[in-house]
Image (cartoon, rainbow, N blue to C red):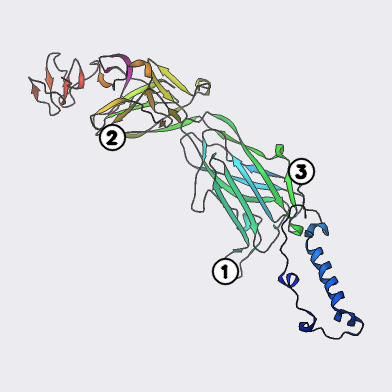
Amino acid sequence: MNGQRVQIPALFLYMPRKSCLKVPDFGSLRWFKEEAVMKAFIRWVWVLCLFPPRVFGQAKLPVTTSDHFVVEAPAVVQPGGETVDFIVGVEGSRFYTAYNMEIALPEDLVFVPNDKGNCAMMCGLDGMYPYDDSMGFPQFTHIFASGLQVNGNLRVACFSSLNEDFTSFSGRLFRVSVKASPYAKPGMGEIRMFGLNLTVAENAQKYIPEGDLNTGEIEVGNHASVPVSISAANRYGTCILPFGLEALPAGLEAYTVASVSDGVLNLDPVTALQAYTPYVLYAANGFSGVLEGTVDASLYPEDTRSVTVNGLTGIVTPQEVTEGYILQNQGDGVRFYRVGDVPFALPAGRCYLSASVSAGVNLRMERNATGITDSRTDVALPDDTCYDLLGRRVEHLVPGRVYLSARRGVFLQSK
C-alpha cells in the first residue's frame, strides 16, 4: 500500500486444513473450529498486515525546529601553522538521541585526520553522551562516525545502539581538527553545517534545525609559514609567497624571468622577494626550510587566484594547468617541459610558464651572471673562462655537461 513492500509472516501465507489444525476448546471461542470462520479471520489479519505501522501510530514526517547546532571556534588559525580544533554542540529544547550533518569549511581550510578519524566525540564530563564507568573506564552506547566526501565536506553521524538519550538538552557533541593553507587569506571565515537531522528516541521522530542558525566563524591569522624544498639533484624550484622577504636565507637564490630566446629561459637575480610575485629558485646544494612573514590581505589576488609576470604564473590555490610549461626533470635535466594532453595538477605556491613564451620547445634555464660567483673560491670568474663543477678550468666544452662561467653562470652545454 502506498508503494510500500510489506513482509507477511509465513503463518499467514499458508494455513493447514481443519483436519490438521489443533484448536483448544475455549468455551465461548468454540466457533473458531469452523473452517469458514477461521479463513475469514485469517483474511482480515492478512489485510491488516498490509497497512504500514504509522497508519495506526504517530506520523514520522520531519518537524522543523529552532533547536540548532553551534560552533566553539579557536581564537585563530595561522596560514601554514599548527592544527587547531573547533567544537560542535547543540542548543536544544528536548532530549535527543541521534544526529547527522555535513560540515563545509571556508576556502583554504582543510580537515585534518586524528587518531580517531576526522573528528572525535566529546566523551566524559566534557560531552553529553551517557556512559557507564562501572568497569573502570567509560562505556558508551552511542556510535560515532565521520568521513570526507568527494566535495571536501565532512559527513558526521551519531546514534545509540540502545536508543539512549543524551544527558541534557544542550551541550558539546564532538571536536573537529582543521588546518589553514599557507596561502589562506587572513580574515573571518564561515563554518557551515547543513543536511541536518536531530532524532528523539520515541517513534524515531526527526527534527530539522533551521539552516540560518547552524553556522560558526573561524579567524585566519596573518602570520604565514611556507615550506620550501629543493632537492640537491634538481637545484631548481619555483615559488610565490603571500608575504615579502627583505633578504633570502643562506643557500637560496631567486630569479625573475628576463626573456626567452633559442629555447633558453634567461633569468635575472633578485635579492629580495615581493608578496604575490612568481620566482624561479636555485639552490646549488639543495634547500629545505620554512619561510615566514606577515600577510597583507589587501594584496590577495581575488579574481584569478594567480599572478603572472613576464609569462611566469604563480598560483595561490591548487589548479589544473592544461597548457604551458611545468618545471620538471624528465631525465634530461631540469627544464620547463610543455604540458601534454593530460592536465597537470599544480599545488598552491608553485609556478608555471604560459604557452605564449615558446613555440612548443622545452626550455632550459640560464641564470644571468650578476651576483654569481664560484662557489668554491668565492672569486669572480673571468668572462672568457669556463670551469666544470669541480672547479677545474675547461678549454673545450662537451655537449650535455654542466659548466660555470661569470658570463653565463651555471649552464648546460647544448652543442
Which numbered dot is residue 399?
none
Residue shown at the point (14%, 23%) measured from the top left: 399
Which numbered dot is residue 136?
1
Q: Secondary structure at mark 2?
A: loop
Q: Label 3 belongs to which residue?
A: 66
The one nearer the camera, 80 or 317, is: 317
In the rendered structure, which amino acid carries the disc numbered 1? Gly
Q: Earlier in the sequence, mark 1 or mark 3?
A: 3
Which residue range is magenta in the image? 249-267
Q: How far across and down, in percent of the image, does residue 138 sit?
A: 59, 64
The quadrant of the picture occupied by the N terminus is bottom right
Q: Label 2 belongs to which residue?
A: 231
Work out whether residue 246 can be spotted: no
Q: How far across and down, in percent of the image, does residue 414 sit?
A: 18, 21
Residue shown at the point (58%, 70%) measured from the top left: 135
In the rendered structure, which amino acid carries the disc numbered 3? Ser
- Real-space Cα distance between discs 1 and 3? 39 Å
Q: Earlier in the sequence, mark 3 or mark 2?
A: 3
- Real-space Cα distance between discs 3 and 2? 56 Å
The one nearer the camera, 278 or 6, is: 6
Work out whether residue 261 can be spotted: yes
Around disc 1, counting alpha carbons within 10 Å, would you say few (fewer than 14), some (14 to 19), or many (20 or more)? few
Front disc: 2 or 1: 2
